[in-house]
Structure formats: structure tokens, C-alpha cells
Image (cartoon, rainbow, N blue to C red):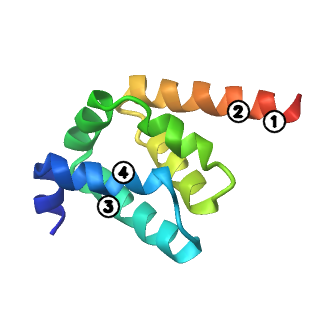
Amino acid sequence: MLEVVITDEDLLTFLFNYLNNPGGKTESSHFARIVMNLLDKFSQDLVLYLRSRDGIVAKMVNNIENQMIVDLLYKFVDAGNYLDVVVVVVVVVVVVVVVVVV
């Protein structure tokens, strides 16, 4: 099933559109697990997709109060092979933390 999702840009877009209006804990858990599995099995393809889309990482950070999304952000940081995506995630998180604290 993951092979179908990663090869279909429309399905990936549908999946990441979840971030526009995330649901409850259960829905967020399902979303995060799917993305984590995609990252584990198809990391290069997923990162290429994320690079081609503006705002996906920012949408994840906008949902920083959602623990499942935070876990997903950590997973991206752990996948340090893709330094440019990791740097974007870290910079956006730092900016959000600074804004929230100030």
C-alpha cells in the first residue's frame, strides 16, 4: 500500500492536506504513522516530494501542540541524511518556540 501512495503525487497531496485541518488524537496518530512508515521505507522519495511542496513543514510546525505531529517532526530530525529538510524543520521549530516564549 505504501508503494502506491509514494508513487502517486495526488495521494501524497491528499495525505498531507490533513495538516490543513488536523483531527483528533486518533486521526493524527494514523497520519503520523503513515508518514513515518513512508519516511522509513521511501525516505528519498518522500523528501523529494516535501522539497517540491511549499509549506508542508510549516504546516507541521503550526500544529506543534499536537504530540503526534511533534513526534513526526522528531522523526524527520532523526533522518539526518537529508540535512536541508532537517535544517528547515529545526529553524522553523526554533522560530515558533521563540515566538511562543516572547
Residue 82 in picture, x, y percent from top left? 35, 30
* Residue to which mark 3 is pinned: 37
Residue at left offset 16%, top offset 46%: 9
* Residue to which mark 2 is pinned: 96
Q: Which mark is residue 100?
A: 1
Q: Nearer the viewer, residue 85 or 99?
A: 99
Q: Is residue 66 depicted above or below 44 in this figure?
A: below
Residue at left offset 60%, top offset 29%: 92
* Residue to which mark 4 is pinned: 16
Residue at left offset 47%, top offset 37%: 57
In the drawing, does residue 61 fall left or right of residue 50?
A: right
Q: Residues within 10 Å of mark 1 (few under 14, many from 20)?
A: few
Q: Amino acid at mark 3?
A: Asn
Q: Secondary structure at mark 1?
A: helix
Between the C-alphas of marks 1 and 3, the distance is: 31 Å
Q: Sequence order check: which comes first, mark 3 or mark 4?
A: 4
Q: Is residue 87 depicted above or below 74 in this figure?
A: above
Q: Amino acid at mark 2?
A: Val
